[in-house]
Image (cartoon, rainbow, N blue to C red):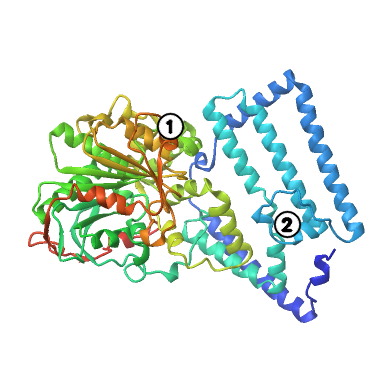
Amino acid sequence: MTTSQDTAPELTGEHIDRLKENMAKVEILSKRLVEVMAHKTPHSPALDGPNQELFARAATAYWNDAIHNPAKLWEQQIEFWGKSVMNFAEAQQALAKGGVEADEDTPRDRRFSNPMWDNNPYFHFVKQQYQTNAKAIAQAVETAKHDLEPNDQRRLAYFSQQIIDMMAPTNFLATNPDALERAVETEGQSLVKGLENLVADLEANDGELVVRLADESAFELGSNVATTPGEVVYRNRMMELIQYSPVTETVHETPIVLFPPWINKFYILDLKAQNSLIKWVTEQGYTLFVVSWVNPKAELADVGMEDYIQDGFLTAIETAKEICKVKQVNAVGYCIAGTTLNLTLSLLKQRGDKSIKSATFFTTLTDFSEQGEFTPFLQDDFIDGIEEQVGKDGILRSWVIGRTMSFLRSNDLIYTPAIRSYMLGETPPAFDLLYWNGDGSNLPAKMAMQYLRGLCQRNEFVTDGYELMGHKLHISDVDVPLVAITCQTDHIAAWKDCYRGVQKAGSRSKTFVVSESGHIAGIVNPPSKKKYGHYLNPDLKGDAETWMNEADYHAGSWWPMWEAWLKKRSGKQVPAREPGDSKHPPLSPAPGTYVSVKASG
């Protein structure tokens, strides 16, 4: 068996000298690292994970089980000891033989794709012991779970998995063969570049570690992303309203007003011409308005959900009606904006206002009785920490939201990018989706707490009613024709949870769709790609499993199906409308000015 020593490059005195020079640069960068960390603004410890009470309860449950069933504990411990000793013995044997026998039974893990994990005795032992430790932790958690409440069970499972993922040997230089090989090959330059990347990321985020996922210098808004032609036709403190230029001679009479989430920027729907939903909608002959939300600073701390509804949703709808000289619009809400569109529909129903002809919801939750993967982050200890922090900052900072989302997929969105950037010294890829993912927005303090407490934690919109703007808003008031687009592998707005909310809406005309793929790819799914299909079933009486079991599968994007649904509710053809009118002159070309404001700015 070939070992790494047989292929290791020969290191001359000249190589060693250059390596020492680069290590000296590392020392200089380390001082910058210490300096930026010394000036880091402290934040509530609760934002970093659960309080100690959860682990105390888990430990108590574990030892209670051990007292009542000591044989089980000893069985697990002996298994762990035995496996650890065997790992060491096999490593010793491999060192004596000069190689490792390939283990075909070991589950494949792409973190361990380097051949040295299999043929080098040292790295093979490290990998085997890590997997042994991971199994032991999982067994201990399973033992402790039985005496905990369901929410605590989910939280314990989540945080224990985070520990397992964090302690992977690939995350540490001394036990990452790819990083060590690259360091030797580049005479230490990869470590210099990696540390430069690390320091730059820390300096850009006030000492918080937010891994940069994309090469930001590769993208320019309005140049190679967010390029669909249009004009900002209205602006207030909450949003810019963009009206997109027509590309057909006639358009449907009823315009579309699209509300994207304000946690991220709207241009996820206009990344490039090939997958732009915004461009595609205009090509189907619709007048399209899209809201571009402000990226709030501390001066907007007192902005609440009522401001997003009044100065955002209602103002955008009225402006579109005035420009198009119509009495109704078709509204679209994505994610949190879909949730707020439901609130708006309830409000309009109670006011007797019929401005919204139909509603489309992309990955929208209204019933939060099941919190799914967000369970760890919706308990009082974490939300109390957020409330404390936003009380100081005036905003819920973008990095808190982004990091929380990333930890739901930590290996893909934190550890792997960190290894590439900080250990291998690679420049992040020029990937438009990852660029957008890193271009987050802050949330106003008041709005964040209204959403987290009233909607997510207390689930008031589908239970006793959500008090806002002098009304008690309830999902049963949502009675316009609606279509809900959900995504099969969505980990943010699980389709089964979205389904439960749609069932409770008061509308007699409901269409429910499950697209293949996740929260973004399932929505940004152009017909030309012919990639992801979708499921349809008009019967919404049963539970989610029944709905899916009886659903029909349709190949290809849901976009054409939605457009056919929308066409029936969009009126006659009228001459194409150029952006704005005499009362709403164009203010700036799309994508506008608000979208370019960075959260860290």
Above or below: residue 351 compared with residue 198: above
Q: Is residue 272 visible?
A: no
Q: Residue at x 85, y 43 (%)?
A: 85
Above or below: residue 152 compared with residue 332: above
Q: Residue at x 49, y 33 (%)?
A: 381
Image spot of residue 183 (x, y percent): 69, 69
Q: Which residue is mark 1?
A: 546
Crowd tier of the residue under label 2, counting other residues whose Cα lies within 10 Å: few below 14, some 14–19, many 20 or above: some
Amino acid found under the numbered disc labelled 1: Thr
Q: Which residue is mark 2?
A: 175
Give the quarter of the figure containing the N terminus: bottom right
Image spot of residue 22 (x, y percent): 67, 73
C-alpha gap between disc 1 and disc 2:
48 Å
Above or below: residue 507 compared with residue 128: above
Labels 1, 2: front one: 1
Above or below: residue 116 compared with residue 369: below
Residue 19: quarter of image: bottom right
Numbered mark located on residue 518 in the image = none
Who is closer to the viewer here, 214 or 367?
Answer: 367
Q: Secondary structure at mark 1?
A: helix
Amino acid found under the numbered disc labelled 2: Thr
53 relative to 5 in the view: left or right: left
Give the quarter of the figure containing the C terminus: bottom left
323 relative to 292 in the view: left or right: left
Q: Is residue 192 visible?
A: yes
31 relative to 509 in the view: left or right: right
